[in-house]
Amino acid sequence: RVVDGIDGAFVTIDRNRNGFLPIVDHRLANAGSSSPERRVRPNQSQPKLKQGTWLPVQVVRPECGNKSARLTQELSFPSLYVVFYPHRTGIAVSKKISDRGELVRLEHLGREALNRVGLENALRKAAAGGLMFRTLSQNVTEALLIADIQRVMAQWEFVRSELLQPQVMRCLHRGQPNPVGWIQQWL
């Protein structure tokens, strides 16, 4: 259900639950734009969404009280050490890692890891996919980082294959349960 006054749409994400998708987050907003942010400027025309349109979305903020869950179409696959973004390119490192040697090591490791899993060529051709090393990745062994990257890539491959199936409402991927997330943050 598209609501003009608030520049967004309420998307059914479960049989009896809706989530809010701001129009500025809609990936069609700047189709063909080279801008990595893909945000709509106020004077640009906004995409015309219609009721019944099938959209793959990700919950970025769960529902709280009487507020609906916040949704986005900018998919991300976070893990302990990295975050994979299928619709972005490049390798980034957390700003909290200030050691220049560690920054270079992680960027180099990211390129090597993409080569090892056979993605670098696919990324160049499709101009899609990027990694961001989280703060916890600092001083972590290469083997653990590569395993983490392979895990998030496997998650994306599964979701991508499911997106090619008939367009029906279903959950394609769930993040880790909250207790595991709390433990990861604490560590």
Image (tube, rainbow, N blue to C red):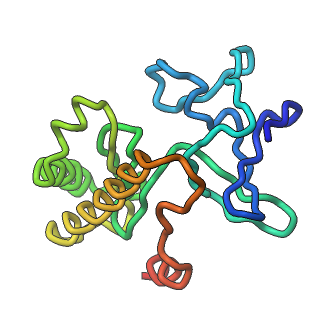
The one nearer the camera, 46 or 169, is 169
Compared to 135, does 86 lie above or below?
above
Q: Quadrant of residue 153?
A: bottom left
- In this view, the residue in front, 155 or 16, is 16
- Compared across the picture, whether 8 is left or right of 13 comes to right
| Residue at image point 52% right, 22% down | 31
Q: Is residue 98 visible?
A: no
- Look at 16% across and 54% down and name the residue there: 113
Q: Is residue 151 above or below residue 46?
A: below
Where is residue 180? Give x, y as percent. 47, 82
In this view of the protein, can residue 168 be seen by the observer? yes
Residue 24: quadrant of the picture: top right
User: Which picture quadrant has residue 30?
Assistant: top right
101 sits left or right of 64 in the view: left
Q: Point out the image quarter for the C terminus.
A: bottom left
120 or 139, nearer to the observer: 120
Image quadrant holding the N terminus, namely top right
Residue 170 locus on image (x, y percent) = 56, 60
Figure label count:
0
In the image: residue 117, left or right of residue 164: left
Image position, residue 179 (x, y; %): 53, 85
Residue found at x 59% / y 43%: 55
